Image: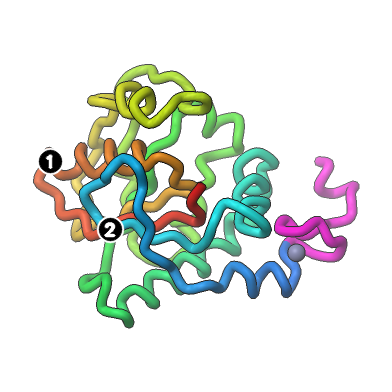
Amino acid sequence: MTDLLLPRRCAGCGAPGGDLCRRCRLALRTPPQRIHTRVDPHVPVWSLGAYAGPHRRVVLAMKEHRHLAVRRFLGPVLAAAVTHLQARGELVDAPVLVPAPTRAASARMRGGDPVTDVCAATGLPVSVALRHGRRISDQVGLGAEGRRANLSGALELRRIPAGPVLLVDDVATTGSTLAASSEALFAAGCEVAGALVICHA
Ligand SMILES: [Zn+2]
């Protein structure tokens, strides 16, 4: 409702006028780069940028502020990153995007899971294959080991993705969510080609 009453502002910098200004669109156009997380997810991880500036604010907008227009915009950004990785030969096959699982309660508060929405907006095949099988605590405030313990064995496979998987998440911090995700997929015999995140902390 507030969206209708307030003037639209850029989700990346707050400038009035639209959902995402030209400068922030350009900032998000950076090619994906290989990153290394503290917890090894056993697959290559690529990020579109550091958790700062427009990347950080766009992620916060789509997560915390239920900015649905930004989720739709980020779909093509992610699709372009996949094309980049394929052109560079780092991603060989056409992947099936698998969103990293989110806690159901957070997804409800956020107006649906933002990462799943972004994946759906890429136009690429998506499989919502992973979910939390038991209650887990919020990851915020936990260190790398705590996060790993919190997630260990907590993920369930709802279905087998039809092809090599590219995991997708909004932010990689310790890498524990990606590691738990790839472990659950590997355990089911799936091929995981890598993980792509919008930004890394
Ligand atoms: Zn902006």
**Residue under numbered circle 1:** 188
Amino acid residing under circle 1: Ala
Query: Which part of the image, by quadrant, shows the N terminus?
Result: top right
For residue 25, side relative to residue 138 (left or right) = right
Foreground tag (1 vs 2)? 2
Q: Under tag 1, what secondary structure?
A: loop
Q: Which of the labelled discs sits on residue 44, or is there none?
A: 2
Amino acid residing under circle 2: Pro
21 vs 97, nearest the viewer = 21
Residue 191: x and y in percent read 15, 54
Q: Is residue 5 magenta?
A: yes
Residue range of the region highlighted in magenta in the rendering:
1-19
93 vs 174, nearest the viewer = 174
Ligand 1 resides in the quarter of the picture at bottom right
Report the residue at 39% width, 52% height from top.
168
Main SS category, magenta section:
loop
Report the residue at 60% width, 36% height from top.
110
CA–CA distance in space, label 1 to label 2:
19 Å
Q: Which of the labelled discs sits on residue 150, or is there none?
A: none
58 vs 33, nearest the viewer = 33
